[in-house]
Image (spheres, grey):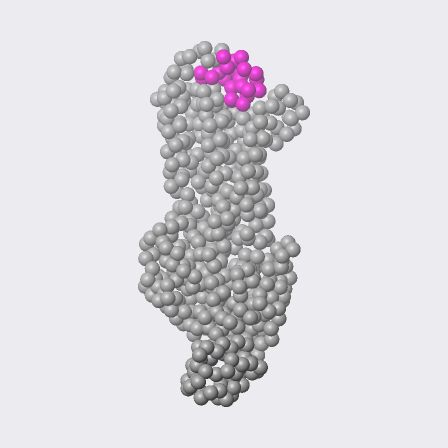
């Protein structure tokens, strides 16, 4: 459920309230209010430099808010280090002591988090296909990211803060990772999943929060966004249609006519465009290129304020 | 047990091994060279002609001649080589403890665990202390083991050799604490190393010049080099000034750095 319609804020696993962070004259995060409930996966989307990483670092207590508040599991991580034991964190650029092996890191972090969980580590290592006995500096980018993922999931945290988690992963590992995220949410974990690539978020998140220049542009369910997303339709006719067939049709933002075919991009409902096509010279085929969230995000990123 | 400290020591163990070997080698060379120096009384006359300030910097003067065991060890080792080596080692390790780790983007990963910044600071400071103590112990042990073979132990029981080594380690500790405090407060490794090095050099220069420039005397009193060199721990044992002052200054610096570290943004 979305935070705006769900129960009292006290139940939110992650909550920020008018959270603001300025570095000198630069405002990295501005008046950000966001909630993630237990069991919910929220995609945190925005272009590079939008403030996603700053928000996550505020949630972990690495940075102190300029104003506003943020809590994780009811506590402020900056003042209450114990709560960080219930958070799994994957930084955007995962790095560790280069001479340490994955296994050493997992054992060390297990110790710090109240006892190692060998069985879970072995399971994660197996599922992601990681060799934990190799020093970090000998690993490829993708394998380094796997080390980061294992340490984030190894203690079955109640909150997952994942900063661009799929970077460097091949598609198979990516799928396994998304499965891990879903399982964690089914087990009750609250997941904040930042990304600048909309499709990967679309696959797991029920809700997305879009941030642009430090401000929350919109939060809504993925379904609702898809309803608003730009839709691409392809029509084929028995005879070449007139070039102006889709001109002045409500919702049509783009139309190209080429021979007997027409490609049309529609924002919002497709009914008017379909009616226009039916009125064309013998409609043969209708094809859909599917919903294109990417286009919508580009529009949202560009625009000052939406919805 | 103390996982942050343990990991910090492990991360530096190779470096510690090489430093230990190097320092033990230096001690061995000193011992091998001593018989030649001992029999060369020309050297005593040359060094006796030096200004008292320079002699003081070398741990000579008074009854202590260069060819005596105490004069030789002071002028060749305890007044310069050992403190400088321990200082370079300690400042290097300390600069990594907070600010170097932070610059490498690995400190945040540790602090995402349920450990407070104060605990990380305390355990890392403890790791530096442990590493410095080990290196000092290796150096003292090498000296105590080789000294009797060449007569360097005449008038210098093992306790005195140890006391002089500890006094040098305490000097290194003060400047390491400077690097720790600056690094913890600013998160900048270069600034931490530069501040500690500049103060160490300044302290040494002041100690040398103060003999000729009376105006520098009050400043000299605040120099860890003065606490070390003026008390001659090799012949007089550890005076209170040689250990109370360094430990007190170190404690204050570590606490101040940690307090600032707890409340600032990570970089």
Residue at 38% across, 17% down: B35
- In the image, residue A214 above or below residue B249: below
Residue B192 magenta-drawn?
no
- In the image, residue A52 above or below residue B30: below
Residue at 40% across, 72% down: A183
Residue at 47% across, 87% down: A281
B230 left or right of A171 in image: right
Q: Where does residue A240 sit, x and y in percent of width and height?
A: 45, 82
Dominant secondary structure, magenta = loop
Residue at 40% across, 23% down: B30
Q: Where does residue A94 sit, x and y in percent of width and height?
A: 44, 56
User: A242 or A52, which is in the foreground?
Assistant: A242
User: B60 or B158, which is in the foreground?
Assistant: B60
B257 left or right of A179 in image: right
Q: Quadrant of residue A50?
A: bottom right
Residue B50 magenta-drawn?
yes
Q: Where does residue A115 sit, x and y in percent of width and height?
A: 40, 60
Q: Quadrant of the C terminus of chain A?
A: bottom right
- In the image, residue B101 above or below residue A251: above
How many labels were placed on the picture? 0
**Direction right: furthest residue:** B215
Extent of the magenta region: B46-68
């Amino acid at each position: 459920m979305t935070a705006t319609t769900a129960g009292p804020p006290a139940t939110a696993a992650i909550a920020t309230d008018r959270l603001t962070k300025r570095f000198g004259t630069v405002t990295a995060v501005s008046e950000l209010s966001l909630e993630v409930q237990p069991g919910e996966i929220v995609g945190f989307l925005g272009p590079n430099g939008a403030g996603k990483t700053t928000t996550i670092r505020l949630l972990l207590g690495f940075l102190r808010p300029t104003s506003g508040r943020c809590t994780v599991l009811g506590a402020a991580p900056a003042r209450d280090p114990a709560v960080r034991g219930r958070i799994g964190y994957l930084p955007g650029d995962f790095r560790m002591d280069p001479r340490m092996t994955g296994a050493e890191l997992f054992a060390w972090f297990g110790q710090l988090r109240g006892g190692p969980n060998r069985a879970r580590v072995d399971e994660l290592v197996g599922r992601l296909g990681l060799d934990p006995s190799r020093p970090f500096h000998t690993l490829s980018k993708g394998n380094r990211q796997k080390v980061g993922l294992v340490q984030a999931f190894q203690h079955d945290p109640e909150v997952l803060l994942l900063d661009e988690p799929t970077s460097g992963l091949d598609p198979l590992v990516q799928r396994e990772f998304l499965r891990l995220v879903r399982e964690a949410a089914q087990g009750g974990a609250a997941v904040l999943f930042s990304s600048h690539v909309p499709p990967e978020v679309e696959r797991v998140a029920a809700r997305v929060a879009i941030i642009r220049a430090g401000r929350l542009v919109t939060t809504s369910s993925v379904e609702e966004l898809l309803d608003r997303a730009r839709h691409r339709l392809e029509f084929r006719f028995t005879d070449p249609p007139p070039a102006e067939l889709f001109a002045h049709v409500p919702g049509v933002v783009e139309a190209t006519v080429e021979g007997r075919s027409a490609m049309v991009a529609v924002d919002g409902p497709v009914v008017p465009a379909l009616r226009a096509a039916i009125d064309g010279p013998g409609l043969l085929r209708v094809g859909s290129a599917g919903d294109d969230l990417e286009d919508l995000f580009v529009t949202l990123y560009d625009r000052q304020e939406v919805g | 047990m103390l996982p942050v400290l343990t990991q910090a020591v492990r991360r530096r163990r190779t470096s510690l091994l090489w430093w230990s070997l190097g320092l033990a080698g230096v001690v061995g060379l000193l011992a091998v060279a001593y018989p030649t120096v001992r029999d060369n009384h020309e050297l005593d006359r040359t060094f006796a002609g030096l200004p008292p300030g320079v002699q003081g910097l070398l741990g000579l003067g008074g009854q202590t001649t260069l060819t005596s065991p105490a004069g030789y060890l002071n002028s060749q080792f305890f007044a310069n080589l050992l403190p400088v080596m321990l200082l370079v080692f300690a400042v290097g390790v300390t600069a990594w403890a907070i600010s170097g780790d932070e610059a490498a983007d690995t400190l945040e990963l540790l602090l995402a665990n349920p450990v407070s910044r104060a605990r990380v600071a305390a355990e890392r400071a403890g790791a530096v202390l442990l590493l410095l103590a080990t290196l000092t112990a290796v150096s003292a042990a090498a000296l105590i083991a080789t000294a009797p073979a060449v007569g360097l132990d005449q008038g210098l029981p093992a306790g005195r050799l140890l006391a002089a080594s500890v006094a040098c380690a305490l000097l290194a500790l003060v400047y390491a604490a400077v690097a720790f405090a600056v690094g913890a407060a600013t998160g900048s490794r270069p600034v931490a190393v530069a501040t500690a090095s500049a103060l160490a050099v300044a302290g040494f220069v002041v100690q040398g010049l103060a003999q000729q420039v009376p105006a520098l005397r009050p400043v000299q009193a605040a120099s860890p080099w003065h606490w070390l060199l003026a008390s001659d721990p090799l012949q007089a044992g550890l005076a209170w000034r040689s250990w109370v002052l360094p430990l007190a200054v170190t404690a204050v610096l570590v606490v101040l750095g940690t307090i600032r570290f707890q409340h600032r943004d990570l970089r």
